[in-house]
Amino acid sequence: MELLEKAGGWLNQVTGVAVGLLALAVVLQVLFGAPVPFFPVDVVGNVVGVVGQLGSEGLVGLVAAWVLLSVLSKRSE
């Protein structure tokens, strides 16, 4: 049981770092434009694409958005 708690804590920390890097990439891309040297991916375009896909899927998209929101809100508590 202790091993599972440690693994869950580690995954929670990795997810937190990934969300932080995503937020940093979005801010940098908004400030400096698409060609940010150390983020060679169009982060804002990818986020807009994911949101568009979720929106076009109707009920399945709403459920997926609800699951993502619940996972991220549990992580912040």
Image (cartoon, rainbow, N blue to C red):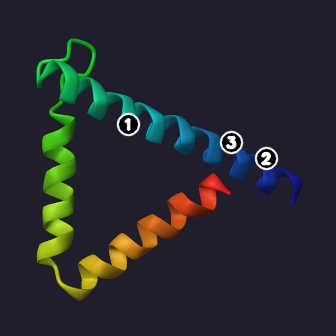
Of mark 1 and mark 3, the one earlier in the sequence is: 3
Q: Is residue 33 above or below residue 54?
A: above
Q: Is residue 62 left or right of residue 67?
A: left
Callout in the foreground (1, 3)? 1
Spot the residue most to the front. Answer: 31
Quadrant in the picture for residue 59:
bottom left
Q: Which kind of residue does numbered mark 3 sit on?
A: Trp
Q: Nearer the viewer, residue 4 or 42?
A: 42
Distance Cα–Cα, label 1 vs label 3: 20 Å
Quarter of the picture containing the N terminus is bottom right
Of mark 2 and mark 1, the one earlier in the sequence is: 2
* Residue at (17% x, 73% y) in the render: 55
Q: Which residue is mark 1?
A: 23
Quadrant in the picture for residue 37:
top left
Q: Which residue is mark 2?
A: 6
Counting other residues with Cα less than 10 Å from the Cα at mark 3, is it few (<14), some (14-19), or many (20 or more)?
few
Q: Which residue is mark 3?
A: 10
* Residue at (17% x, 18% y) in the render: 32
* Residue at (20% x, 27% y) in the render: 29
Callout in the foreground (2, 1)? 1
Q: Is residue 18 left or right of residue 57?
A: right
Where residue 68 appears, as percent x and y from the top left, is 43, 65
Q: Which kind of residue does numbered mark 1 sit on?
A: Ala
